[in-house]
Amino acid sequence: WSTWSEWAPCSRTCDGGATYQTRRCMDMVRGCGIHERSIRYQICNMQGKLYNWVPLTDKSTPACSLSCRAVNTSLIVQHAARVHDGTRCKPGSLDMCIDGICQPVGCDLQLNSDSKVDACGVCGGDGSTCLDNTSDDLVVGYRWEFGHRLSPCTVSCDGEVEIICRDAVTGLEVSDQNLCDESSRPQPKFVQCHTDPCPPKWIVGSWESCSVTCGGGVKERRVYCQQGHNNSRVDDVICSALIGHKARTHEPCNTHDCPNWFQGPWSQCSTRCGDDGVQTRVVVCRDARGHVTNACRLQDQPPTSRSCPSQPPCPSTEPPPTTTHFSLSSFYFLSFSLFNFLSRPLTFIAGEWSPCSVTCGDGTREREVNCKIFLEFSKTIAKLPDKECPGLKPAQVEPCFMRPCMTKPSYAVPTSSVTAPLLAHSWKSSGFSQCSASCLGGVQESIIECIREQDGQRVGSHLCPMERRPDAITRTCNDVPCPPRWNTSDFSSCSRTCGGGVQTRDVHCIHEVARGGGNTLPVGADLCPQPPPRAQQYCNMIDCPVEWKTGEWSQCSSTCDGGFKVRKVSCQQILALGQVLTKTANHCNPTPPPPGPAPASASDSPKIQSTNQNFVQQGQSKKKVTLKIGGKATVFKGTQIKIRCPVKHFDKSKINWMKDHILLVKNAKHELNKKGMLRIRDATFSDSGVYSCIAGRSVANITLLWPLQQQPEQSPSSSKKNSKPSGSSSSSRHNNSQRSKLRNASPGHHQQKTGGAKKSVSHPASSSSSVISTKGKADSLKFEWLLTPWSKCSQTCGGSGFQVRAVQCIVRHNNVTKSVEASLCEDAGLANPDTPDATRPSSLASSSSSSNNNRQPATVQKCGLDTCPHWVAGSWTPCHQSRCFTWNTALQKRQLDCVMDNGTLLDAILCSDRDRPSQKRECFNENCRGAWKVSDWSHCSATCDSLGHQSRLLRCVWYGTESPAGMAC
């Protein structure tokens, strides 16, 4: 690895940003490890606060300094001692800042001129050209005018004509209306609009508070019909007829029961005699759900203690009073919250186990487990519902095992529990669990069960000795490629914060042939399940706040000596569905509108319109690819790449490009045109990396990647560590020499296993020892293609089926195998095992096919038939000749054949079962009825002088046949 670069500028100036460092892998042959990263990040500029700044133009600051005030604060900061030359000293004034000093500008638009506009509106005049010097309508500098635009019509009527303030010299409308004399402002003009009567509407008021807090009350609200520009109340019948039914004015509320006091029974007296005894009880306030609450009226609370009635007097020898115990059942209704100050913690208390339920074999035994509490004030243990105790309740039932049951016991066995010997149960393996993955290799584990040896029944694992439990066996399963699937990225951030935006994501159909991010291939969308996942969705469907909207700046009013640019400023609101609603200016108050005319100056930090794309080139047939800056892109070798850098309000000829933080210049490989576009000719692996588009102070990046199946083109000698720096010609000759040595290497062994899981074809290399390692000789290097078997065809027919496999170039050196770039096997003259000459030495291959013979073996190939076979059905058998199925019903059959379009007969397995026609059907056959078929009587069992018998055979058959008819007779 190279050393880490300097930290990049922080992405934000305050309130938290990110910066990064990069480094490059210097070993292009062996790589630097897949777990090592070439970029690292850290947080920066966490301090500070983001402010919204507005210009400050008051007498407390110099007129030509760049002073700003933070919105909604008193913070004032002077960003520069002077502004750009040509900036107006104050809004609406002709005076101009030059070299930080406010220079006067006359009405003749000349610097340091004292020309003024006279009372008649003439620059430099003396006021003698006025028609009526006594007129009060003359305005010096600025004047009021009626505009040509009407304000939006109000909800009721009467629209107002806009009044604007205009510069008398330049004729431009000014945004600061304080420059015109407010005393001479004309009265507004009104134009009638929307004279149609407003439609009626229901006015629905808010619900009043409920009449009661519990026990069922009523709440009310006002609902009435309103119509007209003066919002007058009309009869409800008008709204009911034109709009709909009137909303309800009453609604029930607080229907739950009121909380009540619940009291328990009185306890026994605290003493056995005398008048000092006290009885107590617990009084609890509970709501409608039975929960303890403090919502009951305290004045209604029943007493919690009383003196004991009718206690006998104590004799003189009576010992001190002793405390008695309460009944357990009297505390069932108490809640856990009341026990916090009356008792010790709640807990489950378990009783003794009962005898085993059987005298032999497997049985159960039981015990009583209750939630109990010890009450301090009464020294009593109370039983409560199980839900009041914390934690899990102990088991009330557990298995037990007595002696083995005997069919014929020879002696009596006591009925007490006897622990079974450990040899009565043993561990047994019963298959494997379900595979953890359906494809690409999963794992499954052997199932170990405890069984009873007497009858082989499965029992609890606690009955078998754990020290004799065999180890579980884990094995791989389903080691086959997965079918094509949809691969989706995360949705991007919403394009708008309000007013209806869109989120997008990348959706691609991929085929994963091995685990790992680089072992996937992009395939056609028709191979993945349909329909595909959606690639975009709507977001932030809410109305935007009312705010000022600004248009584009116009061209500068002057090509030199200072000028102005003008833009349109309006108060607008964007609704949830994207509609733009224009509002009056008072809706945007008190936020001041953006400044109107502004000095013309180019921004040094324009916004680059980058994307968050993940582009993958679908095939090598397309030799030209046009990309937009942002995200990452994967392209093939030999592609011509164009990268656009869209940016507004910036001279695109001044856009610069960098690759891996190194400035690019125009050469045979890279072309930079006047539109700021970068063109990369005949892309190779060395062109992969991070490309940066720089416009002023703005930067955007795109990362170019290489497909997994295309290895970088690189001479083996490029990794030589001990090569001396020399001229380009000697270096070129050295590389050609190395390649020549590899291609002319002496032929080695070629082997190919057709039936195994992998096959390989190898060659020893005769290049110098610096090709792979700094130790050993070149003749000890042997290159091999390592191939996995072809996967199952994705489609058996239809012309779009394909198979995939993994191809890897490996080198053997001193019994050490290492994966290297595919170009090394090609340069070593290693034969392609897929070609007919693969089993012959490369030196014997014909020159016309040598280039194809040494190329990397294919990783994808077509398979299956171009057209799919189909089913052809024959004629049904006649119903009267078909086999009877049930009463009056026969079963017809017909022949089904799987054939090609040309009539070729194929195996039925090649046709789709989904499209397979039915081969059997039922039909009505009146001959399908049962009939008894009898045989002849047998000979008599007796000849004479005794009683004999004869027998015959009865069979139920279908009428007219010998076929058995079962129960149809």
Image (cartoon, rainbow, N blue to C red):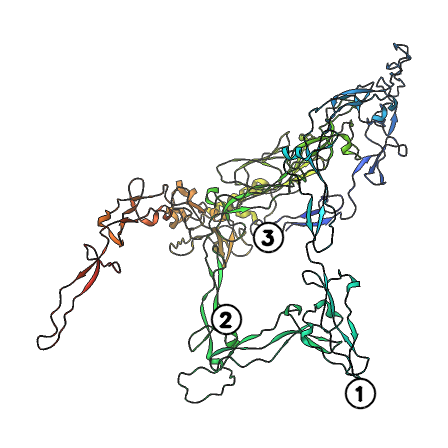
- The numbered mark at residue 471 is 2
Kind of residue sitting beneath label 2: Asp
Q: Is residue 19 above or below residue 951?
A: above
Say whether disc 2 or disc 3 marks the residue closer to the N-terminus. Answer: 3
Spatial separation of the CA atoms under disc 2 and disc 3: 40 Å
Q: Quadrant of the C terminus?
A: bottom left
Q: Is the residue 500 above or below the residue 154 in the image?
A: below
Q: Which label number is shown at residue 32?
A: 3
Q: Is residue 703 visible?
A: yes
Dividing the picture into quadrants, the one containing residue 704 is: top right
In the current view of this chain or complex, which residue is farthest to the left? 944
Question: Which of these two is toward me, 432 or 402?
Answer: 402
Q: Quadrant location of residue 280?
A: bottom right
> 491 or 245: nearer the eye?
245
Report the Cα–Cα distance between label 1 and label 2: 72 Å
Numbered disc 3: secondary structure: loop
Identify the residue under disc 1: 319
